[in-house]
């Protein structure tokens, strides 16, 4: 029997055993630290609220120097609102803590300014109540539709916020009499935008909830 016949009797050569290859470890998802720069800016804005009120009510709100201090604190706090959001999105620093505290800090600052100006008799209470009712109502709507989705901020909402900040700043500054109409007009525009964007939010929330209910067959 030749060598070829022997190979046929022994059967086909066995396939080589697969060589085990090490599976590279997958990197663990990066955990965002709670005390990051974006959250610290948000906390600083919240902590500036009592400082702002102390400056606003100093000497019954009639001292020019203290009013300038109140305006400066309000302006700095408002700027941090823009910065912390950009930092969180750019560097991946978005946390549940920031999502909760950021809108609270925004509403605390704006609400404190409106209530303070009304308490000093410089801003009609009905304006403060209209704006406050809108903000509380929108917050409740968010909870109402949260299981169906999140309504993104509209361009009108962003313009509303900027207009409110500008109007409040104009009221805080000790403007000469010939510039006072700037404060009145800007606050009037802020109230109109507050109401219009509030109605728009209600419409979008109702539509979002209706789509969510249809999706689950209710």
Image (spheres, rainbow, N blue to C red):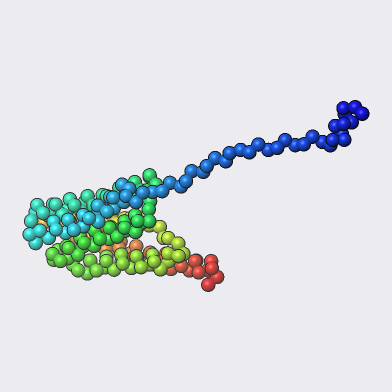
Q: Residue at 87% x, 35% y: name it.
A: 9
Give coordinates of residue 67: x percent, y percent.
Answer: 12, 55
- Residue at 21 percent across and 57 percent down: it is 49
Asked whether 140 or 101 is in front, the reply is 101
Q: Position of residue 134 (x, y in %)?
A: 31, 66
Query: In the shown orientation, is residue 37 left or right of residue 167?
Result: right
Seen at 13% across and 64% down, the residue is 120
Residue 22 shown left or right of residue 135 in the figure: right
Quarter of the view holding residue 216: bottom right
- Residue 89 is left or right of residue 211, and the answer is left
Asked if residue 62 can be seen in this view, the reply is no
The residue lying furthest to the top in this view is: 2
Considering depth in this image, is 37 or 58 the residue closer to the camera? Answer: 37
Residue at 87% across / 27% down in the picture? 3
- Residue 36 to residue 153: above or below: above
Q: Is residue 217 visible?
A: yes
Q: Which residue, as the protein is rendered here, is positioned at the far right?
A: 1
Q: Position of residue 31 (x, y in %)?
A: 41, 48
Q: Quadrant of residue 108?
A: bottom left
Residue 158 sits in which quadrant? bottom left
Residue 11 location in percent, x, y? 84, 37
């Amino acid at each position: 029997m030749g060598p070829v016949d022997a190979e046929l009797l022994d059967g086909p050569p066995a396939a080589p055993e697969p060589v085990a290859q090490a599976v590279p470890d997958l990197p663990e998802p990066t955990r965002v630290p709670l005390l990051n720069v974006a959250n610290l800016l948000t906390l600083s804005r919240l902590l500036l609220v009592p400082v702002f009120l102390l400056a606003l009510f100093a000497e019954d709100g009639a001292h020019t120097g203290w009013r300038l201090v109140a305006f400066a604190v309000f302006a700095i706090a408002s700027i941090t609102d823009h910065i912390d959001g950009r930092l969180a999105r750019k560097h991946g620093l978005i946390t549940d803590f920031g999502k909760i505290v950021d809108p609270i800090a925004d509403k605390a600052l704006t609400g404190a300014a409106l209530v303070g100006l009304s308490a000093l008799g410089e801003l009609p209470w009905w304006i403060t109540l209209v704006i406050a009712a809108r903000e509380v109502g929108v917050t409740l709507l968010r909870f109402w539709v949260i299981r169906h989705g999140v309504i993104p901020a509209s361009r009108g909402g962003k313009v509303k916020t900027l207009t409110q900040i500008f109007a409040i700043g104009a009221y805080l500054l000790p403007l000469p009499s010939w510039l006072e109409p700037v404060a009145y007009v800007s606050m009037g525009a802020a109230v109109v935008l507050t109401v219009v964007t509030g109605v728009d939010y209600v419409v979008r929330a109702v539509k979002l909830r209706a789509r969510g209910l249809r999706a689950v067959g209710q």
